Image: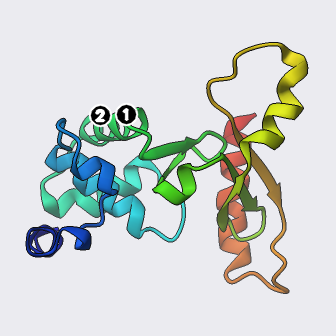
Amino acid sequence: MGIEKAAARAEPDASPLPRETRSDPRKMSRNEEMVYGQLLMAAGPLKAYALLDRLHDEGMRAPMTIYRALDSLIGRGLARRIASLNAFVALTPETRAGVGAYVTCTRCGRTRSIGIQNTIVERLLAPAEMAISDVYIEAFGDCDRGACADAATKAKTVERNTQARA
């Protein structure tokens, strides 16, 4: 993280943090910056204990430290919990626009984020006659790739996560 901070001081646009967060008077804590950085760099959703493992050498050793940082990031609109996976993803200005939809392959566990226009969701939810404050969609299917890499190993992980939901 030290290199990123130095780059951000030398050139403000080099920071991995969204511009509105950098100018926010309520600065991110060191822990929030580290957790958000890991979420941004991750190839997919990360569980809290995976974040703890990744940040152990940076001094984060207590699960509650990770959960506090995640709660703050979610509150700021910089992260989202994918309930079915009990994992977290970083949100950027691009992924915060519209409704977040997450599609997970049941064979390999790969998760993709797809933005859906608010107007589409508003029309679908209009019969509810409520002021909807938050919507996100989770869907499951199989990759369009012919054979998922390490499908057997990753499918077991997804199956365990699916059973935990039930």
State how far apart marks 2 and 1 are (Cα). 5 Å
Q: Quadrant of the C terminus?
A: top right
**Dot 1, crowdedness within 10 Å: few (<14), some or many (≥20)?**
some
Q: Which mark is residue 116?
A: none
Q: Residue at x 30, y 66 (%)?
A: 16
Q: Could you tell me which secondary element the residue under label 1 belongs to?
A: helix
**Left or right, residue 101 beside residue 14:** right
The residue lying toward the viewer, choosing from 10 and 61, is 10
- Residue marked by disc 2: 68
Q: Quadrant of the N terminus?
A: bottom left
Please, is residue 130 above or below residue 61 in the view? above
Q: Residue at x 85, y 86 (%)?
A: 146
The residue lying toward the viewer, choosing from 136 and 165, is 136
**Dot 2, crowdedness within 10 Å: few (<14), some or many (≥20)?**
few
Q: Could you tell me which secondary element the residue under label 2 belongs to?
A: helix
Q: Residue at x 72, y 41 (%)?
A: 118
Picture coordinates of residue 57 (x, y %)?
16, 63
Q: Residue at x 25, y 70 (%)?
A: 13
- Residue marked by disc 1: 71
Q: Amino acid at mark 2?
A: Arg
Picture coordinates of residue 34 (x, y %)?
24, 56
Picture coordinates of residue 6 (x, y %)?
8, 72
Q: Quadrant of residue 163?
A: top right
The residue lying toward the viewer, choosing from 138 and 161, is 138
Coloration of the structure image: rainbow
**Left or right, residue 64 beside residue 150:** left
Please, is residue 118 above or below residue 145 in the view? above
**Left or right, residue 47 beside residue 32:** right
* Marks 2 and 1 close (CB-CB < 8 Å): yes
The mark total stands at: 2
Q: Amino acid at mark 1?
A: Asp
